[in-house]
Image: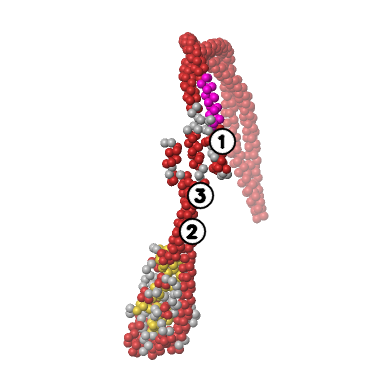
Amino acid sequence: MSAQKQNKNLSFFNSLKWKISAIIILILLLVLGAISYLTFNSASEIVRNQIDENINLVASSYQTNVKAMLKTLDRQIDTIKSNSSFNGYFALMEGLYPGGEADAGAREEFAANIDSFMGMQYSTAGALRSVRNNFENIEYAYLVMADGTVISDSRAYSAQALEDHDHYLKEKLNQNLYKNISFGTIHKENKQNYLLYNSPIYADDGETVTAYIVLALNPEIVYSELQSLNVENAENYKLINSDGQIIRAQERELFASQVDNDWFIDNVTEQNSVNSKEVGGYYLLKNQITKNLALAVEIPTEQMLAPVDRLGRTIWTVSGVFLVLALIITVFFISWQLKPLSSFMESFRKMKNGDLRDQVKMNKNALKRKDEIGIMAGIFNEMLEELSKLVVDINQQAESLNSSAEKMDQNSREVNQGAEDVGLAVENLSAGSEEQLAQIEESNNNVQRLNKEIKEVNKNAEEIEAGADEVLSSIEEGNQSVSSSINNINDLSQETKEVAELIQNLGRMSEEIGDIVVLINDISNQTNLLALNAAIEAARAGEAGRGFSVVADEIRSLAEESAGATEKISKLIEKIQLGVNKAVNSMDQNEELVEASVDSIEETSSIFKEIRKVSNNLGGSINNVVKRISSMREESENVENAINDIAKVTRDFASSSEQISASTEEQAASTDEILSTAVELKSMSENLLKNINDFNIE
């Protein structure tokens, strides 16, 4: 398909102007969408804040009204507490009250006491009934003790009324009906709903609760005492208690019914003052009024955000109109800016057909533009001029190339013939080299085997030499050991003689000690005799010599002990002398054995010297053999190295011959390729000249 036909078939949606317009419109859509989204969220947040503010105002109003109403009820109860009849009756009942832990008998006696003072009970009931006259929404009131026993009820204010309401007195109530009560607690009695409110009565200590006054209020009190809501969607506002029961709603018949949404029941007991959440298409908000009351608001999200939806539709309508106008303006502007592209396309089409004349260049209007299109127009004209010059140069070079290709063809044929002759000669030379290499390798293998045998012999000779050295070393060590033994035995002989002399001296000394022991024994005998004489003389002296007699006895006792010790020493000396004699005899025998050992060791030393002399002669012979074998091994290795060098040279020569042959074959093949390439090059140069002539540059 031609470029002109492609240009005609280019649809608007495939054109560059449409693509740019689409991108700009897409960006605008994203921007407008983001603005709309942010505006919608901001408006929704503003609406929620307004609703929250209105609910806070309603809750604040309810808090004020509930506090005022509770103050009014407290004033009515204070009126009851200040009544003298009430105080007298309560003081009497408090004195008779047996306590909450009393047994059944005590409780029956307390109930009988209540019946005994019916006149005072009627007066107290009248005091309770008086608050109904002062505050029309109080239906009835009753007084209960701390354990829940009813001691007075405004409905039992006379004997006639007592007949219908006697069951109210003396009854023990559940704590939820007198103690655990906050305003908003609902009590249903005889199919009628009441709101309960209590006030404790404290003992003198101000802390202990002794009784409770309970008011039963008409549900209308929440409508008469609490102001009506002046807000939009008032039907969505409900006052509920902690049990989820409706206390006030626009539809009064909903009183005491359970709130529909469980979310309020789950959150009404939380201490947070305000909770809100969107659940199931409704905006739910709980605002705590008192501990037992909360304002519950349930507004449909669609109804709440209706103004925001209208604002959103308006924004989208304005955005749509803006987008249409923006699309028209964008397409018109881009078409005006991209108009020179048509001239570019036409010029490129002419270039494709080989037209490189000046008429193809971009016009002056395009060149005057200072934007990217103007720059592109200038670059295009420069490219056209350079391309024209390039075509002229290529034409000249193609003619030179054609001439060179013809010469290359002729030279390639001559080179090919020469390469074939060289290849034949190299093949003959390579065959001879391979045969010579085989013979050299066989000789090399024989020399290597011989060299291996020589190395084995050399190894064995070296081991023999090493063994001879070890034998000589052992002989030398044995000779040294024998000499050392002779020296040691001579030293031992000398020491033995010295020990013998010492033992003989010891024998002589022991004989001298024996003489000294005999002398000591004689002295002890004489001392004993003197002690005996002293004892006899002391006995003669009578009482005056008694102390001397004791000393004489001690001296005689010591003399006897010395005689016994000298006798033991004498026996020991005899044993020592007997041992010394035996030791002297043994030392004489050891001296003879030492002399015999010295003679034997000296003979062994002479034998070692002869062995050493023979071993030295044998070592010299072994060293000569080892030296001869080492020389033979070195000569064999030299022969092997020489043959290896010859084999290497021959192998390199054979390899070079093969490489020369292969190179010759490759050169021949390359020459054939060069010849073929020269033919193709000549054909290509002719085609190049033909194609260059297709360009129109003049």
Measured as percent of width and height from the top left, residue 694 is found at 48, 28
For label 2, the crowd category at 10 Å Cα-Cα, with few meaning under 14, some 14 to 19 and many 20 or more, is few
Q: Nearer the viewer, residue 698 or 340?
A: 698
Instruction: Name the mark on residue 128.
Output: none
**Residue beneath disc 1:** 382
- Asked if disc 2 and disc 1 are in contact, CB closer than 8 Å, the reply is no
Q: Which residues are magenta?
A: 387-404
Q: Residue 257 at x, y = what percent?
A: 36, 73
Instruction: Locate residue 64, reporting x and y percent.
Output: 48, 76
Q: Amino acid at mark 3?
A: Phe
Q: Say whether residue 621 is visible.
A: no
According to the picture, the residue beneath numbered tag 2 turns out to be 38
Reading the chain from its start, which is encountered first: label 1 or label 3?
Answer: 3
Helix, strand, or loop for circle 1?
Answer: helix
In the rendered image, the vertical position of residue 194 relative to residue 20, given as above or below? below
Closer to the camera in the image, 447 or 287: 287
> What residue did someone put label 3 on?
333
Task: Identify the residue at image location x=54%, y=16%.
Answer: 462
The tag earlier along the polypeptide, 3 or 2, is 2
| In-image side of 194 versus 467 (left or right) | left
Is there any visible trace of residue 193 in the rendered image?
yes
Residue 450 horizontal/vertical position (percent): 49, 11
